[in-house]
Amino acid sequence: MNFQNVEFLISAASKENFPTKRLPEIAFAGKSNVGKSSVINRLLQRKNFARVGDKPGKTVHVNYFTLDGTCYLVDLPGYGYARASVEVKAKWGKMIENYLHKSQMLRCVFLLIDIRHEPSSNDKLMYDWIVSQGFQPILIATKADKIKRSQLQKQLKILRTGLGVGTEVMMIPFSAETKQGREEIWNYLVLELQCRVLSSYS
């Protein structure tokens, strides 16, 4: 399941830089260093397509990628990086807010949370904000390979409890190392969104 033409389009520093071409958009949100770039690289089966960094807060713009010219994959700035200045945090927050509020073509939001830890206050705020904008985020519990299989259900329950959600909210354990969860994400996009470009590669 591969795309033939995957391209980086633009790193938008403000809403004025958002693409004007109307295409369906699939957005990825999560705190700094949660593994967004790794998830995107694994999903697209591209090595280091989205930049992966050891330093949190690497993504400071809204990054757009085009998938076969028919939809956008949108990498939102990581939130919650403690060492970022108040001004930078405010800028990132405003950019995410503007994107979620202004985008008329957003079809799905994936919210990434580290499976090893309880959701932070910023995770909870982001989840509630996405819901307030009319979207039910699909939760991706990243770094699943970092815990024992016997701990998986316990950690997923911790995430649900911390976010205040039940089992009706989709949560997908994911590992960029083992590919766990990759097919579940694609199946959601194909079956629920009925996006033609995705179904053509299923």
Image (spheres, grey):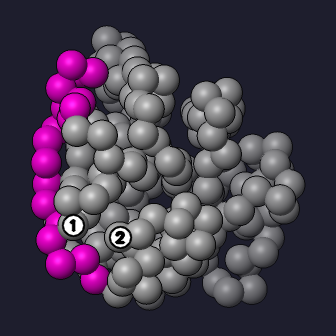
Quadrant of the snapshot with the C terminus? bottom left
In the image: residue 120, left or right of residue 94: right
Tell me whether circle 2 and circle 1 mark residues in contact (CB < 8 Å). yes
The kind of residue tagged 2 is Val
Instruction: Find disc 1 in the rendering and name its residue.
Output: 68
Say few, some or many: other residues with alpha carbon within 10 Å of mark 2 (under 14 / 14 to 19 / 20 or more): some
Identify the residue shown where x is 16% and y is 38%: 11
Q: In which quarter of the image is residue 151?
A: bottom right
Please give the range of residues in magenta. 2-20
| Label drawn at residue 93 | none
Secondary structure found at label 2: helix
Secondary structure found at label 1: loop
Measured as percent of width and height from the top left, residue 88 is found at 30, 19
Identify the residue shown where x is 27% and y is 59%: 70
| The stretch drawn in magenta includes residue 200 | no
Q: Looking at the picture, tell me which residue is in the foreground, 100 or 48.
A: 100
Say few, some or many: other residues with alpha carbon within 10 Å of mark 1 (under 14 / 14 to 19 / 20 or more): some
Measured as percent of width and height from the top left, residue 188 is found at 58, 70
Instruction: Find disc 2 in the rendering and name its residue.
Output: 197
Instruction: Please report whichever mark, 2 or 1, sits nearer to the chain's N-terminal start.
Output: 1
Q: Quadrant of residue 152?
A: bottom right
The kind of residue tagged 1 is Asp
Residue 153 in sight here: yes
Identify the residue shown where x is 61% and y is 65%: 192
Measured as percent of width and height from the top left, residue 167 is found at 84, 62
Residue 128's place in the image compared with 36, above or below, is above
Q: Quadrant of residue 164?
A: top right
Instruction: Spot the residue most to the top.
Output: 87
Identify the residue shown where x is 77% and y is 46%: 162
Residue 93's place in the image compared with 170, above or below, is above
